[in-house]
Amino acid sequence: MKIALGMIVRTLDAEAKLMSFIENAEKYGHKLDCVIVAHTRQHDEKIEKQIREKATLYAVDINNPEYCRSQMQRLNIPEAAMKTLLDCPVDTTSGLIPYGHNRMIVVMEAILREIEVLFFVDSDIVPLLLKNTQNGHVLEETDFFKAHLDELKKGTDVTSGEYSGYNILPPASFDGMADFLAGVQKAEMLEYWQTSDKHKCITYQPDEIIVKPCKKILGGNLAIRLSAFSNLPPFFSSHYMLDGELYLCRGEDTVLGYEIASLGTKCTDIGIYPLHDTYDSFPEVPDLVNDELVQRRLFFACTGWVGRNPFYNYILGKDPKETRQFQREHLEKGLKALSDYTKNPQYLGVLKNFDVSWDNLDRYINEFETVTDAWNKFKKGVGLK
């Protein structure tokens, strides 16, 4: 089984935890046929050298994915489809690239290099399990790849799992929590967030590892049998502009996870929770009221959630007018409460992000249809469909 490890980054440097996964594979005897990194900026030569000493590295410049282009030309994939799939849909000066486009560059590179299983990890994830013991937090290394491969060898097509570490929702307590969560389409998190004074919004690796079928995937703890893409749409997420600033929509894994479930693709939760250093300050408890970096992280999560939700609700088949009205009413109240709680007026502006994103829904749908059509032409060209 040919295996690749994939990651999307702006800059490949020591902050990207890629080496920890390469060393984890080596330690437990798993051969990585290659490592594929999609990037937008120059990477650290020292880190690149360290990686190349351990594995075959394909560093793919998002602005110029040369290998993908040359191989797609060789396979006579139509020029219009190539342009859709390979040309970045935004100005890359800021280093911000839509997550779906980024992931699909890695997926196509892997397919064209005849990889069978592609692992995705994020740059703020490490192959360590956070456990809660009588002596406090303990981090234990795990055989990350085995946990996924065991299930893939049994016939599942996609494997994923949760993260340990701090949730993107930091500990908080204010009266508008229900409205805020309803507005960003995370109402199921209400009880969890309201009790954050007890658990501090931290997740630990369960003592009992439970492997089970699932309908949810997380892009930073993910393995895909690439042949499964014969029946799947592409990873997809879009972007929007507000006052001259680019914002990325979140949820490319959420959308594909829904499609995986609806199409009957076999997906398994491996029960392994690698550590997610959400705020880049673990084990420090995130302080939403006093820490500007925590506030900023949550702000951009909000702009990503309200960016994602119009298209996600379209995929779910929900009525756009009713959904927009319901979410906006709750979001306006929730953002006011969050702004008062944090004394940060920036959160009030998320309502404008919400409106702009919903106004772009038709564009999102057209983009998805165009990308999906190009993706189908790519799959036909490589023999996946």
Image (cartoon, rainbow, N blue to C red):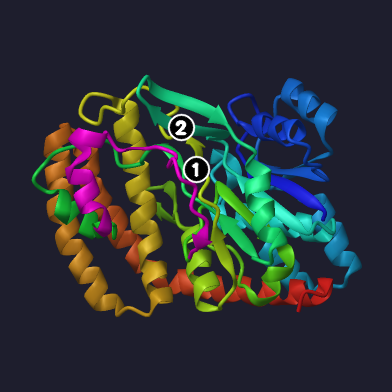
Secondary element type, mark 2: strand
Q: Which residue is pictured at 77% across the width and 55% down the height?
A: 110
Q: Amino acid at mark 2?
A: Leu
Secondary element type, mark 1: loop
Q: Residue furthest left?
A: 175
Cα separation between marks 2 and 1 = 8 Å
Give the magenta range. 188-214
Taking 21 as reference, is 359 above or below it? below
Q: Quadrant of residue 123?
A: top right
Q: Residue furthest right?
A: 74
Residue 298 image point, x, y percent: 32, 40
Q: Which residue is mark 2?
A: 130
Looking at this view, is 193 or 246 the one in front? Answer: 193
Q: Amino acid at mark 1?
A: Tyr
Q: Which residue is pictured at 51% across the width and 34% down the height?
A: 129
Q: Which residue is mark 1?
A: 273
Q: Are marks 2 and 1 in contact (CB under 8 Å)?
A: yes
Taking 347 as reference, is 80 above or below it? below
